[in-house]
Image (cartoon, helix red, strand yellow):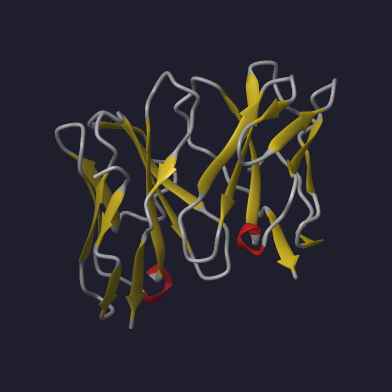
Amino acid sequence: GAGVSQSPSNKVTEKGKDVELRCDPISGHTALYWYRQSLGQGLEFLIYFQGNSAPDKSGLPSDRFSAERTGGSVSTLTIQRTQQEDSAVYLCASSLVGRNGELFFGEGSRLTVL
Amino acid sequence: DAKTTQPPSMDCAEGRAANLPCNHSTISGNEYVYWYRQIHSQGPQYIIHGLKNNETNEMASLIITEDRKSSTLILPHATLRDTAVYYCIVRALRSTDKLIFGTGTRLQVFP
């Protein structure tokens, strides 16, 4: 597609379950970012990928959160043993290294933990 | 921590110019000023960026002071669809560092 694609767009899960959120960046974009945004709050950085490696994982809030990227393309954010405070919109963005630094964001995955 | 300071909210009448200020007094010589906006329930959208010269594109104009310690984003003819949260961010141009979003300015355009 032409833009960043995220799935699912909405996910409702029970506390304690694991969830996987997927991000398809724009083709050719080597940098990929995950953010989350709780209701009424700003964007919180989670992790950044350059290719398949993650030089900056500083925003992951706990060891229940992990992410991987394969083939320099699709990325998956996994949250294990979800808690109610994990409820948020998880946003993915990609960018083309060496250009003007513009990040292209997806529409996000809204996670609700009951 | 965000390196920018913005007013939490502003109002603007439809059809008038919206001028959104941003302070970035600790900006480094290699850092650009970027503006993004986030319309409700959507992902952030890039608007414009600049180093020291004023910039203009189809969406907005960016005015950066000579000392580069502050800037103003100008939407020349605001419409209701411009209602959004506007984020001012400083970042090195070719950096792949994360964008650090502050709290932004919530712009409300009214009829």
In the picture shown, does residue A109 fall above or below B23?
below
Task: Tell me if A27 is positioned left or right of B4 in this view.
Answer: left
Is B15 or A114 nearer to us in this picture? B15
Task: Identify the residue at the far right of this view.
Answer: B66
Q: Note whether A60 is above or below B108 in the view shown.
A: above
Residue at 25 percent of width and 81 percent of height: A14
How many numbered discs? 0
Q: Quadrant of residue B57?
A: top right
In-image side of A94 versus A24 (left or right) = right
What is the residue that sits farthest to the left in this orientation? Answer: A71
| In the image, residue A21 above or below residue A24 | below
Determine whether, in the image, residue A27 is placed left or right of residue A93. left
Position of the C terminus of chain B, as image quadrant, is: bottom right
From the viewer's side, name the closer residue of B85 and A42: B85
Q: Residue at x 76, y 57 (%)?
A: B15
- Which of these two is toward me, A26 or B2? A26
Residue A58 screen position, x and y as percent: 43, 41
Q: Position of residue B86 (x, y in %)?
A: 65, 51
> Image quadrant for the N terminus of chain B?
top right
Q: Residue at x 42, y 41 (%)?
A: A104
Image side of residue A52 versus residue A34, left or right:
left
Q: In this orientation, which residue lies closer to the viewer: B5 or B11?
A: B11
